[in-house]
Amino acid sequence: MKMTGNTIFITGGGTGIGQGLAKAFHGLGNKVIIAGRRKAPLMETAEACPGMDCHEIDMRDPASIARVAEWLVKHHPRLNVLINNAGIMSGDKTGSVMDDQKTLATVETNLLGPMRMTSALIEHLKTRPEAAVVNVTSGLAFTPLAHSAVYSATKAALHSWTLSLRVRLKGTSVRALEIAPPWVQTDLMGGRDEPRAMKLDAFIKETMEKFASGADEILVDRVRMLRDNPGPDEWAFVEKFNGMMAL
């Protein structure tokens, strides 16, 4: 993906990884529009980056996604990059009685949200000479964390869907890319001060370097042990990993 001259829309762009990517791409001179549920962090981020735009969105609501997509095409017709970053994570009780509302919220936000957002914008993106859909998954897409089984499953599904999207977009001007972060110091699951997690600034710096390399999968070195695990003997590492991460 080219690193400059883009008009980029980032969901979940007011905090965490989304905010970090927004600031990094803005710093390279791209036009960046961020969106999320909460107005205050969106405004704070945009005000700190002159020229950045923002819009509220509910990734669980198809009507909200449709309205924002229509607004984007009307007010930012040069839009050529969609970064599906918005996501939620919580612990769950897989193996016991599940909280159905929490499960539904996670699936709608993390999986259906990116699918719907992409569907709403894909035909417009095809009109741009160099375009991309970037899905933010997780190292847990490849090695699940049993404490957050639903989150891990949504990210595995989004990875699979990204592979299919890449096949279906062959021959168009749109690339399907994937960022699979490791554990990063963000507010997700209260990890901002977690010493075992990767510092956000370091993650963004390395991720931008990987973007510039032209790879389809943007993988910082720290996530590779999770990414490389799937295979016929994957259970052994899944068991070991979850033993290390036991809360």
Image (spheres, rainbow, N blue to C red):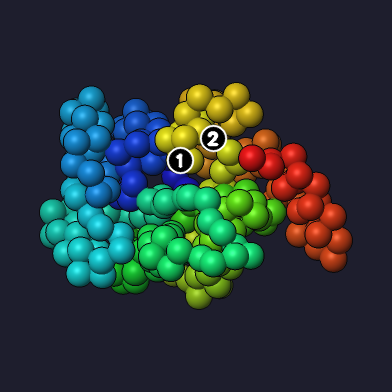
* Res. 145 visible in picture: yes
Q: Which dot, 2 or 1, sits closer to the camera?
A: 1
Name the residue nearer the viewer: 142 or 132: 142
Q: Give the amino acid type for the residue marked by disc 1 in the picture.
A: Leu
Q: Residue at x 56, y 59 (%)?
A: 93
Q: Residue at x 23, y 25 (%)?
A: 48
Secondary structure under badge 1?
Answer: helix
**157 left or right, relative to 26:** right
Q: In the picture, residue 20 is in which quadrant?
A: top left
**46 left or right, relative to 232:** left
Q: Is residue 157 above or below residue 181?
A: below
Residue 154 in percent (x, y) is at 52, 62
Classed neighbour count for the residue bearing mark 1: other residues with Cα under 10 Å, few (<14), some (14–19), many (≥20) = some
Residue to which mark 2 is pinned:
184
Name the residue nearer the viewer: 247 or 170: 247
> Mark 2 to mark 1: distance in Å?
9 Å
Q: Quadrant of the C terminus?
A: top right
Q: Residue 188 got which mark?
A: 1
Residue 135 in percent (x, y) is at 47, 56
Question: Given contact means CB atoms under 8 Å apart, are the residues at marks 2 and 1 in contact?
Answer: yes
**40 left or right, relative to 156:** left
Q: Give the amino acid type for the residue marked by disc 2 in the picture.
A: Val
Classed neighbour count for the residue bearing mark 2: other residues with Cα under 10 Å, few (<14), some (14–19), many (≥20) = many
Figure label count: 2
